[in-house]
Image (cartoon, grey):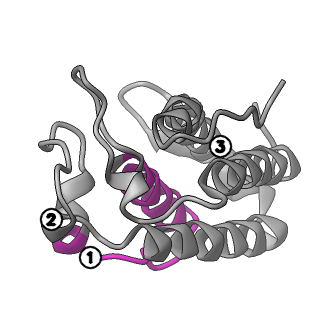
């Protein structure tokens, strides 16, 4: 079972990678759509923020966005195909940073018993396991950002 420090380190790693993949990209570049079914950089950022809001709520913190503000980025929503339906990408990046600070602060002071408490009684999943699952979901989407960075014409390599 992951402990608070491991969770902090895991979220720090993906925050670093998200920022590296976004470095130098404009909002317009983050709206570029793949030529096949998928989502743009902006949608993935928004989706990560909605995921992190779930983390914040589990940690007893307030989410950064209302459900109405981020409905655009919920699972199953239509792809973002233009600026008129997107939250500004740089605002989403700021939300990733803010969530990181809040996640770290909450996990630094959390009572270990909170992490071992059962979150989902039907599946016997603890709060720590749910947080770990939400982080895994974030890593899945963070990996997609590399392809979308290349779509924007960077022709570089962040990891590797």
Taking the spot 43% from the left edge, 77% from the top edge, the residue there is 64
Quadrant where the image shows the C terminus: top right
Q: Relative to residue 116, is residue 96 depicted above or below?
A: below
* Lower position in the chain sequence, tag 1 or tag 3: 1
* Lower position in the chain sequence, tag 3 or tag 2: 2
Pair 1/3: label in front: 1
Disc 3 + disc 2, Cβ < 8 Å? no
What secondary structure is marked by label 1?
loop
Location of residue 85 (image quadrant): bottom left
Pair 2/1: label in front: 2
What secondary structure is marked by label 2?
helix
* Lower position in the chain sequence, tag 2 or tag 1: 1
The range drawn in magenta is 44-69
Query: Of 65 and 78, which appears nearest the observer?
Result: 78
What secondary structure is marked by label 3?
helix
Taking the spot 46% from the left edge, 35% from the top edge, the residue there is 151
Say few, some or many: other residues with alpha carbon within 10 Å of mark 2 (under 14 / 14 to 19 / 20 or more): few
Q: Check disc 2 and report the residue beneath it.
A: 85
Q: Residue 52: x, y in percent?
A: 50, 58
103 sits to left or right of 28? right
Magenta-drawn stretch contains 63: yes
Q: Which mark is residue 66?
A: 1
141 sits to left or right of 22? left
């Amino acid at each position: 079972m992951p402990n608070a420090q491991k969770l902090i380190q895991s979220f720090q790693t993906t925050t670093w990678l998200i920022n590296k993949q976004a470095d130098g990209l404009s909002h317009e570049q983050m709206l570029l759509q793949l030529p096949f079914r998928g989502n743009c950089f902006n949608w993935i950022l928004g989706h990560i923020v909605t995921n992190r809001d779930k983390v914040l709520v589990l940690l007893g913190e307030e989410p950064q966005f209302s459900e109405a503000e981020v409905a655009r980025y919920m699972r199953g929503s239509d792809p973002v195909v233009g600026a008129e339906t997107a939250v500004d990408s740089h605002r989403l990046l700021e939300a990733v940073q803010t969530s990181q600070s809040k996640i770290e602060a909450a996990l630094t002071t959390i009572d270990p018993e909170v992490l071992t408490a059962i979150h989902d009684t039907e599946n016997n999943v603890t709060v720590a396991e749910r947080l770990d699952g939400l982080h895994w979901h974030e890593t899945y989407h963070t990996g997609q950002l590399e392809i979308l960075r290349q779509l924007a014409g960077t022709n570089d390599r962040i990891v590797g």
